[in-house]
Amino acid sequence: MNTNKSAIFLTSALACLSLAPMAQANTLVFSNTNDQAKVVARTMDLKENEFPMLRLSPRGLSRIGDLSNNHLSWQSSYTSVVVTAYNTNAATDGINDQGLSAHMIAMPRVDYGVRDTSKPALSNALWVQYVLDNFKTVEEALASLPQYQLIHTTVGDKEVHAELALQDAKGDSALIEFVDGNPKIYHGKELTVLTNQFSPDIQIKDLSLYKAFGGELPLPGEFDANSRFIRASSNLKALPNPSNAAEAISGVDGVIRTAMVPYGHEASPTRWVAIGDLSNQIYYFNTTMTPGVLWVNLKKLNIKDGTAQILTLDPKEASMNGDVTKLFKPEKKG
């Protein structure tokens, strides 16, 4: 059994992620009412390039969630593919081989509360990885919340501020926020569109003002969080019922791209788009600086117990396109 000390590169990851918390934007769309495939898509919009890498983690890895005296530790039960930032193991997005997806959603301010040393610590930069390592469903992930405490890692006066969005192959969905140190959970299959900076209950109230939801206003064309939420909600609502999984994926892809921010706009541009087919455990990824779309099929992996090792792939190479499941290579040590 290989051991992966997940917190080793954490400080440098948080340093980069926290440089400009307000410069991050995200849009997430989840198609969960069709009977072909449950599909989730998200954008990552950033002022700066965070150098995304794809990281494949087989089951059987031992990890720790922080470098403090009382830290969370676990052995991964499931295989996952995640997107990491700044050449570290800080995961921002991904799915596992059980059809669970997890997404770090940047928010202007998040309060995990005063450190309770009776609970094991888990860095929020490893939250995505922890969930995908350990759980099959949204319900299981939510039930684990009381077992650990999320923490910030301070670098100067900057910190990562993140919430977690979850979806599963059954169509369930949740968003975990933290207010005054306590988790606030939005949970249900109706939670299909998310953008950062506003809670879902605030944004849903505005939908009735727009034509697609019985109002009079046309769809907004700006790139602020509320405009992206309204536009994505309307376009998701308009999707026809797909006749197969490919149509389900293409439909969601079309919706998420209406919320993308082009380069040159004053808002943070979309750096990459990820799409998870949760029903078939396929993860699609496209950087906006390369023309190709690549994917990882977790069902095609043949992982033998006792041989687990982390594999990585650089999706930014212009030649990357199509099924890259077999192109991952062992993670470089250094």
Image: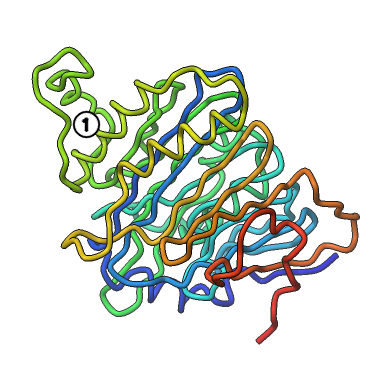
The crowd level at tag 1 (other Cα within 10 Å; few <14, some 14-19, many 20+) is some
In percent of the image, x 90 and y 55: which residue is there? 305
**Residue in the picture at 39% in, 33% down:** 185
Total labels: the figure holds 1
- Residue 121 visible in the snapshot: no
The image's colour scheme reads rainbow
Q: Give above or below for 68 relative to 179.
A: below
Q: Quadrant of the C terminus?
A: bottom right
For the N terminus, the quadrant is bottom right
- Residue placed most toward the observer, 69 or 34: 34
Residue position for label 1: 203
- Above or below, 208 relative to 98: above
Name which residue lies at 57% across and 68% down.
89
Callout 1 secondary element? helix
Residue nearest the viewer, comparing 332 with 326:
326
Percent from the top left, x then y, of residue 191? 39, 27
Instruction: Write down the quadrant of residue 81 in the picture.
Output: bottom right
Picture quarter containing residue 155? bottom left
Residue 100 x/y as whole percent:
61, 38
Q: Nearer the viewer, residue 76 or 270?
A: 270
Q: Position of residue 200 (x, y in %)?
A: 28, 32
Q: Residue furthest left?
A: 216
Quadrant hosting residue 246? top right
As drawn, the residue found furthest toward the bottom would be 334
In the rendered structure, which amino acid carries the disc numbered 1? Gln
The answer to whether residue 290 is above or below residue 120 is below
- Classify residue 263 as left or right of residue 210: right
Give the residue at x 44% y 22%: 188
Using the rendered image of the protein, determine whether residue 315 is visible from the camera's viewpoint: yes
